[in-house]
Image (spheres, rainbow, N blue to C red):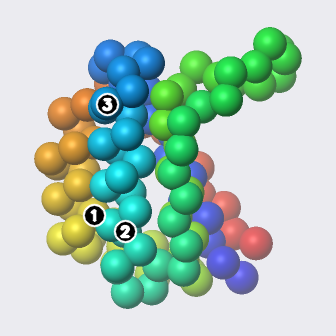
Amino acid sequence: HALHHVVLCWLKEPGNAKNRNQIIEVSKSFRKITGVLEVRAGQVVSSDREIVDDSFDVAIVVIVPDQKRLAEYLAHPVHQKAKSEILLPLVDRIVVYDFKE
């Protein structure tokens, strides 16, 4: 029963490839955190379908076994460092969706 932590990011400079890549690269470091089962990160796929929200720049998905591990991941120094040094300086808006299988 894995828990999926989905993070959508809107950059302060929308479409800035360098900033987008920094976020994608730092997200890979989350794989080092105990309890993290999988991390995926990438850029938006633009769409002309009305139902598709393609307004964000970067999406990150972190999969953990349960809410306890999610809390540990969020508090972990590797995550906190990425958040304070990369994410918050580059990102204008963040929306998070958590769901469990």
Displayed quadrant of residue 81: bottom left
| Disc 3 packing (10 Å; few <14; some 14–19; many ≥20) | few
Nearer to us: label 1 or label 3: 3
Marks 1 and 2 close (CB-CB < 8 Å): yes
Q: Nearer the viewer, residue 80 or 48?
A: 48
Q: Amino acid at mark 3?
A: Lys
**Mark 2 — residue?**
30
Q: Amino acid at mark 2?
A: Phe
Q: Residue at x 66, y 78 (%)?
A: 2
Left or right of 16, for residue 59: right
Nearer to us: label 3 or label 2: 3
Task: Indicate the quadrant containing the C terminus: top left, top right, bottom left or bottom right.
Answer: bottom right
Residue 29 in the image, given as x and y percentages of width and height: 33, 67
Label 1: element kind: helix
Q: Residue at x 41, y 74 (%)?
A: 31
**Mark 1 — residue?**
79
